Structures are given as structure tokens and as C-alpha cells.
Image (spheres, helix red, strand yellow):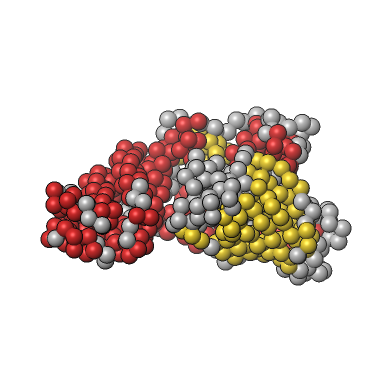
Amino acid sequence: MIKRLPWVRRVGAGLLALLGVVALAGAWVGVRGLNARDHLRQAAVLMDQLRWEMAGGDTRAAAATLASLQRQTARARAQSDDPGWRLGRGQVVADDLAAVSTVAAALDDLAREGLPPLVETAGSVDLGALTPRAGRVDLAPLRAAAPRLAAADDAVRRARDRVAGIDPDGLADRLRAPLRQLRDSLDRAATQVATAARTAQLLPGMLGADGPRSYLVVFQNLAEVRATGGLPGAFVTLRADRGAIRIVDQSTASALGRFARPVLPLDPARRALYTDRLGTYPADVNFAPHFPTAAQLLREMYRRRSGRTVDGVLATDPVAMAGLLRVLGPVPVPGGPTLTADNAVRVLLSETYAHSASSTAQDRYFAAAARAAFQALTTRRTDPVALAAELARAAGERRLLLWSADPAQQRLIAGTVLEGVLPTSDGRRPTVGVFLNDGSGAKLGYYLRAAAELSLGACRPDGRRELLLRFSLGSTAPASGLSEYVLGAGLAGDPYTVRTNVALYTSPGGAISRVLLDGARARLGTGLEGRRAVGLVTVDLRPGQTRVLEATLLTGVPAGGWGTGPVTPRLWTTPGVTPWRLSVRSADGCDASK
């Protein structure tokens, strides 16, 4: 993440696209406009060169390239902010010239303040040292890099915000698209550098640099689906002390038993939607798609049963484990088959249920698999870049979720994909959630297949906008031959019918207008979580059947209106055994009056 800087190439590409139309400004301000364009063009080329040098670990060459890049951005800034240029702003291209000036200044600040600490960090931090060796992570390099990465994070965010402040509505048509490309590139840059900066701040403390820490690592069983992935199944308790990590306890959520009353006070709105089971039954703590709630409930349940108070909770699943096995290689598991990247999901979520005589035997194998994977992760030499890529992939799919009892650490986690919390404010990017909870009391979630399409609909006079959601859910379960353990309680009546409770979450301040199931009005339960309206629909699927939900949702009213530029909604879903087929469509903005 630190060395490769893939966002540098994207920023350079966005800049080159922008420069393709900067000649329009040059025609008004003469040679200085053309000079600014040429300097920025050179800067774009040097950004790409810098990326390759850092990817190859040639930090001496990267330092020289950075110096050249700084000279080019400084000259572009000077050429686009002299009296002649400002005089040009009085012409009909005033907004275009101002935009070019802002871009030049933002990129010059980025080259002088954002890139140097990243180059310095790449020269001093070996990614290989950040992977566990003999059960220990060397925390000193990461701790030393934290201040430099924080400075880079601040500089990249300021550059992004300056470019984001350019109003595209006043620009020439040919300037709008490349400006959007540059803005998107800087958005990605800000996300990646912020992730590196937060990691450097977060990991040393979490891994015991300031004293021992302990964590409950929960493996979500996707065969029985829950909003955040699957029901909490096997877990291990880790202890971290000055970078040394070891397992100190291991069990299953079912071993925690049930509780007569909620172990912690429940949010009344969530309680109304999902009942007291959130706080009384360990398998149901994640009915709601709010991971901090599930984590705190599990932590308290574990404390009451074990007497141990952990410092945080991490959740993952077999799909994420399969990704790690692509880097780690095959992992032998006592009492069962060796796990590989190709068979891990199938073995853990299907074959084990078919071949084990009892739930006790299954739990033993799951526990052994978790221990074996942890042992391989902390002792084997691995490719750190490949390992980081797999972890990033799992986090991006929300298969890695993290909560810390330390408020300072939780503030660093907040707002990242690790937090497992829907955005509290959407602005011009409305976020819709589609989350699933098993209603069969069975392990038939292995056979679910899902797809969703989200698009923007009509603008309304009240400032809201329609969101059109089409969600299909299918079952590939056979009609016979499954074990009694897989079929479970058979709460849908027919044991081979998969019952799934679907929760639709609107954007903040939104509402649910209409929900159809297979073209007919659906029976809909409703509630509220935070500022989001929630609709609950039960969907029963016979083997081989696919059913379709169609929903018309209403957004809230964005503080700044919708504007006229493209609007791209976001769609959050429950991670499944197989990836959802997702389609999210952008559309032009609109004024509240349209």
C-alpha cells in the first residue's frame, strides 16, 4: 500500500485528461497558459514515473523524480497565477482559468507536502517486516512511519478538497469530464493514504505496543445468513503483547448458551425490528447490520461466560479465509481435509455438515481449522503485498469487521469499511442497504444466490428523489439428500424451502414508497434505524426457485440540493457465499423544482 501508490497513476491520468482542454484557457492568456499546460503535462508524466520507481523499491530514483515533479508543479502554479493570467479571468473563460489555477496550486501543494513523506516512508518501511514472523510483528517501523503518513494524509485531503471545491456547472463542457476524472482520482488517493495513515496509528496499540491486548475473533458461518454475513460460529481469543500474538481460548458461540434478558441495553428501534434476541442469543447478535452493536453484545456475553474481558472484536468468514489461503498455501487441519483456496468455502460450509456425525464433531473441526489458519498466518513467510491485497479485498467486501473498546482506536476505525456501519449522512450519494437474515433455522444459506440493481428515478418537488431497487434471490438447494443438520428446524414448513428475512434500508431521511414481490404487493413490516426507514419482507424459496423484490424508495433531501452533475447511489449488501451480481446506475442531478 505504501510503496505501490496506485492512485498516483490515476491522478496523473486525470491530470493529462484535464490538460487536453487547457489550451482553451491558453488561447485567452497567451504563452503563460500554454506554459502552465506544458508544466502540468510534465508533472503528469513524472507522477507515473514516481509510481513505478516506488513500486520497484528504487527510493533514490524516486527522490530525484519527486524533486523534478516539484519543480514542474511550482512552475505551473507560478504561470497560472500571475497578473496576465488574472487579467484573463475577466474574459468569458474566467471559470475555466480559475479551475486550472486551483488544480495547479492543489497539485503543487500535494507534490511539496503530500508526496515527500510517502517517499520517505517507502524508503524506511519494509512491508515484509509488517507481516508476522514466528508469531510476532515488528511494531517499531510502523510506529515510526505514523507521523509521516499522518502528514501525507492531511496534504492529500487538502488537495482533494480544493479540487472538489471547483464548481463544474460554470465550466466549459470539454473541461467537466476531465475535471471529474481528476476529482475521482484524488478521492481514491485520499482513501488509500488515509487507510495507510490510520493503519500506522491503529496497529501498534492494538498489537500491544502499550500493554497486552486481547481480542475475540469470530468466524461468521455464511451457511446460516445474518445481516453482517453469517451467524457467529467458532471463535478464538487472541492475546497481543508487544507484537507477539497467540491464541489463549477457543470455543463456539453456541457454547455461550442463551441469556434470560438482554446482556446490554438495546436501542429501542433495533429492538422493535429484531426483538430481544439481539441481546439474549449469541447466534442472533448480528440480525442488525450495525457491527458495533453485535461486537459489544458478543463481548459482554463472552465476559459473562468466560470471565475474560476482551479489548475488541474482529469478525471474518470462510470466503476471506480462502483469499488468505491463496497467499499462505494449503493448510493441513487435524481431523479433517487440508484447506486450500479452492476448497475452503465448500469444505467449511457444506461438506463438513454432510460428513460429520454430530454438531460437536463439526465444532471441533471448525476450531481446528481456525487454529491451523492462524498458525500459518503468524509463522509462514508470505508475500506482504499479496497478503495486503487479499486483506484489502476482504475488507472491501465487508468480510473483515473490527470494533475496539478503546474510544481513541474506535475513532480511527470509524468511517472505514472495517467499522460495519452504514453512513450517517449521504449527501448527493444516497446509500441503500439490502440485508439478509435466515428464517429457516437451517444451514441452507450455502445455496442462496443474489443479484441487485439500483438506479435513480424521478426528482420530486419536495427535494427528494426516487430510488428504484430490483433484488432477486434464488436457491440452488437440491430437493432431497441433505442431512438433518443442514435442514435444521425447517421453519418454512418444507425443510428444503429456504426462508429469508430481507431488510431494506433507505438512505437517511428516506422512506419506502412501494415494495412488490413477484409483481404483487408484498407483506411489509416497517421500522426505523437511525434516520433510515427499514422494510422487512419474508421470502420463501423452494429448491431451484428465484423470486424478485422490486422497491421504490425515497431519498432524504441533500443539504446542498442535487445539482446538475452525475449522481451515483451506493448499495450495501450482506456478504454471501458467492458474490452478489450488482449493478448501480448513475444519473444526472436535478434541482428540487424539477
- Residue 291's place in the image compared with 339, above or below, is above
- Which residue is at a point 68% across and 30% down the rendered structure image? 264
Q: Is residue 378 visible?
A: yes
Q: In the figure, is residue 518 to the left or right of 152?
A: right
Q: Position of residue 90 (x, y in %)?
A: 22, 52
Depth order, front residue of 173/507: 173
Locate residue 453, reporting x and y percent: 60, 63
Is any atom of residue 306 visible in this view? no
Q: Residue at x 65, y 62 (%)?
A: 470
Q: Is residue 249 left or right of residue 141?
A: right
- Give the left or right position of residue 533, taking residue 73 as reference: right
Residue at the image point whose x is 50% and y is 52% from the top: 591
| Residue 375 % position (x, y) | 52, 50
| Res. 281 image quadrant | top right
Percent position of residue 518, x then y: 76, 65
Closest to the observer: 296 or 508? Answer: 508
Residue depicted at 65% across the width and 32% down the height: 300
